[in-house]
Image (spheres, rainbow, N blue to C red):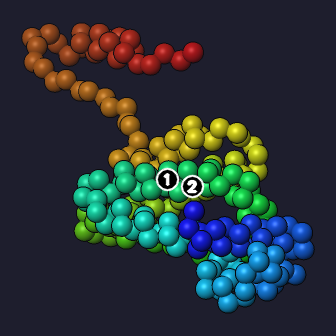
Amino acid sequence: MPASETTRERLMSAAFALFEERGYEAASVEDIAARAGVGRTTAFRQFGSKEALIFPDHRALLRRADARLSAASAEAIPAEVISVATSVFDHYLAEGDRARARYRLTTSVPVLRDFETTTVSRYVRLFSAHLDRAMPDDWNGSLRAEMFANAVVTAHNHVLRRWLRGDTDDPKPDLMEALALPWTILHGTPKVQTAVIVMTTDEPIESLGPRLRTVIADAAPKRP
């Protein structure tokens, strides 16, 4: 492993350990650097802030998402948004205990909760901007793009939080089910349709009425 990656990993491990031991506010960058065996300048050069030590990969994930969506054709963008959300989810799963430690911190430290909220909003804006290319060029298209983007991020975060809390050990099936829901924003929900057939006959309308009512009653869904 390259030295820079080793230093990065040591700094993140030191940060999470100190935040758990002392609390976020009580652990300084100097403390983290000392625990990792590097200088304060090295710590700032690697991450720039304490918040970035908690969310070390969010900028890289956003850049990769932007590049992937930029390369997609307009008609493929909605599916690519789902794929990006799935890949981000897989990233958190791969982090394992570190992702759970981050969750404990963000639920208890307001500044980190705000940082996380800002990060989430960046995904929504990124998805919305790309989805606009796949929608009709009118206010309704922009509305559906924004609704789809928000729905995807909400579905992702809902299932992720369940896993982080320990409510499920196998979150991927739940994620696939949750990410299927936003599609209704683009395509609508299936509707029950009624077929009306018009034909001519020599029979009087009075005799047809009762027979038509019988046919309609037989075709109607039966209640359990």
- Whether tag 1 and tag 2 are in contact, CB under 8 A, the answer is yes
Which residue position holds label 2?
91
What is the number of callouts on the image? 2
Residue 7 percent across, percent down from the top left: 65, 73
- Work out which quarter of the rendered image holds the N terminus and state it: bottom right
Residue 142, image quadrant? bottom left
**Camera sees residue 117:** no
Position of 206 compared to 50: left or right? left
* Front-lying residue, 147 or 180: 180
Measuring 72% from the left and 59% from the top, which residue is drawn there? 98
Residue density around tag 1, few if under 14, some if 14–19, many if 20 or more, within 10 Å: some
CA–CA distance in space, label 1 to label 2: 6 Å
Q: Residue at x 38, y 46 (%)?
A: 188
Examine the rendered structure and indicate whether residue 26 appears above or below residue 182: below
Q: Amino acid at mark 1?
A: Ser
Residue nearest the observer in this picture, 187 or 10: 10
Front residue of this view, candidates 146 and 24 = 24
Residue at the extreme right of the image, as rendered? 22
The image shows residue 173, relative to residue 57, as above or below, that is above
Question: Quick one: label 2, few (<14), some, or many (20+) residues within 10 Å?
Answer: some
Indicate the secondary structure of the residue bearing disc 2: helix
Tell me if residue 11 comes above or below residue 185 in the rendering. below
Residue under the point 37% across and 32% down: 192
Numbered disc 1: secondary structure: helix
Location of residue 153 in the rendering, given as x and y in whole percent from the top left corner: 53, 59
Residue that badge 1 annotates: 87
Question: Hey, which quadrant is residue 224 in on the image?
Answer: top right
Answer yes or no: is residue 11 visible: yes
The numbered mark at residue 19 is none
Q: As shown in the figure, which amino acid type bears the numbered disc 2?
A: His
Q: Give the residue displayed 71% in from the left and 40% down from the top.
A: 168
